[in-house]
Image (cartoon, grey):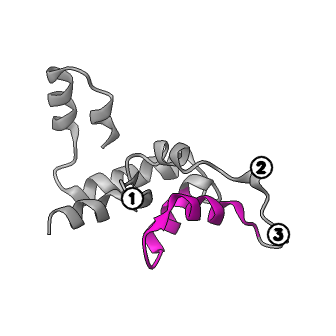
Amino acid sequence: MNSLQNEFTQRGIEGALEKLPPKLNDAYHTAWQRIESRYSPESLIQKAVFLVAYARRPLSVEELEVALTIHIGDKSLDKKGQPKAENLVKHCEGLLTIDNSNHVRLLRELYSCENL
């Protein structure tokens, strides 16, 4: 998915499109495999994807940032440990996006909503 963002010419875009998996689920699986190979299960990247995927409702950027900041045993919120959602999304292989209402969504969820 991110491979298209790295192309700037018609030839490059067509080449990247030819390399995409034939099914959408395969593309998601490939993106997740890249995340797993680059980041540990304890990483903020994997945690961010899981939090967004399993949330009962869309999380705002601020909610995701706070959720990733809190650790078991914390008595208060340490803003020094708070990640920026925009930076996390950049490393999520295109699986997460920030929509116009400032919510972090799975790309698949956004695609499904727009194509109902």
Whether residue 47 is visible to the viewer of this picture, yes or no, is: no
Q: Which region is colored magenta? A: 46-71
Can you give x and y, in whole percent of width and height, for residue 91 in the image?
Answer: 49, 43
In this view, the residue in front, 23 or 61, is 61
Can you give x and y, in whole percent of width and height, for residue 25 in the image?
Answer: 25, 60
Say which amino acid is labelled 3.
Asp
Can you give x and y, in whole percent of width and height, for residue 50 in the image?
Answer: 50, 66
Left/right placement of residue 36 relative to residue 109 reads right
Whether residue 100 is visible to the viewer of this picture, yes or no, is: yes
Majority secondary structure in the magenta region: helix
Disc 3 crowd, CA 10 A, few/some/many (<14, 14-19, 20+): few
- Is 54 colored magenta in this rendering? yes
Above or below — where is 4 with respect to 95?
above
* Comes first in the chain, label 2 or label 1: 2
In this view, the residue in front, 58 or 51, is 58
Left/right placement of residue 29 relative to residue 61 reads left
Q: Quadrant of residue 53?
A: bottom left
* Comes first in the chain, label 3 or label 2: 3
Q: Which residue is mark 3?
A: 74
Q: Which residue is mark 1?
A: 101
Say which amino acid is labelled 1.
Ser
Q: CA distance from mark 3 to mark 2?
A: 13 Å
Q: CA distance from mark 1 to mark 3?
A: 30 Å
Say which amino acid is labelled 2.
Lys
Q: CA distance from mark 2 to mark 1?
A: 26 Å
Residue 66's disc number? none
Q: Which residue is mark 2?
A: 80
Left/right placement of residue 50 relative to residue 16 reads right
Left/right placement of residue 101 relative to residue 91 reads left
Above or below — where is 55 with respect to 83?
below
